[in-house]
Amino acid sequence: MRASRVRHRYVIEAEVDGRPYRLVFDVSASETVYPVTCFPL
């Protein structure tokens, strides 16, 4: 069975309070953002 919506996965890196983090998230066809994971580097 195939998924009915198209998803795009993105990775961003940013600093929060001087510590680097990596955030992985999906964006659905309806432009809803779904976080997958976030972790310190």
Image (tube, rainbow, N blue to C red):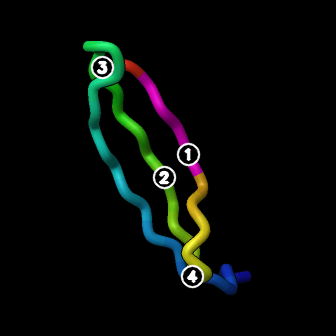
Residue that label 4 marks: 29
Residue that label 1 marks: 36
Q: Position of residue 38 (x, y in %)?
A: 48, 32
Q: Name the amino acid, label 3.
A: Leu
* Residue closer to the observer: 12 or 5: 12
Say above or below: 8 vs 36.
Answer: below
Question: Does the residue at mark 2 contact the one at mark 3 (Cβ under 8 Å)?
Answer: no
**Residue 3 position by quadrant:** bottom right
For marks 3 and 4 on the same chain, the one whose residue lies earlier in the sequence: 4
Question: Does the residue at mark 1 contact the one at mark 2 (Cβ under 8 Å)?
Answer: yes
Query: What residue do we see at 28% from left, 37% from top?
Result: 13
Is residue 7 found inside the magenta-colored segment of the image? no
**Residue 31 position by quadrant:** bottom right
C-alpha separation, residue under disc 2 versus residue under disc 3: 16 Å
Tell me which segment is drawn in magenta. Answer: 35-39
Say above or below: 4 vs 12.
Answer: below
For marks 2 and 3 on the same chain, the one whose residue lies earlier in the sequence: 2
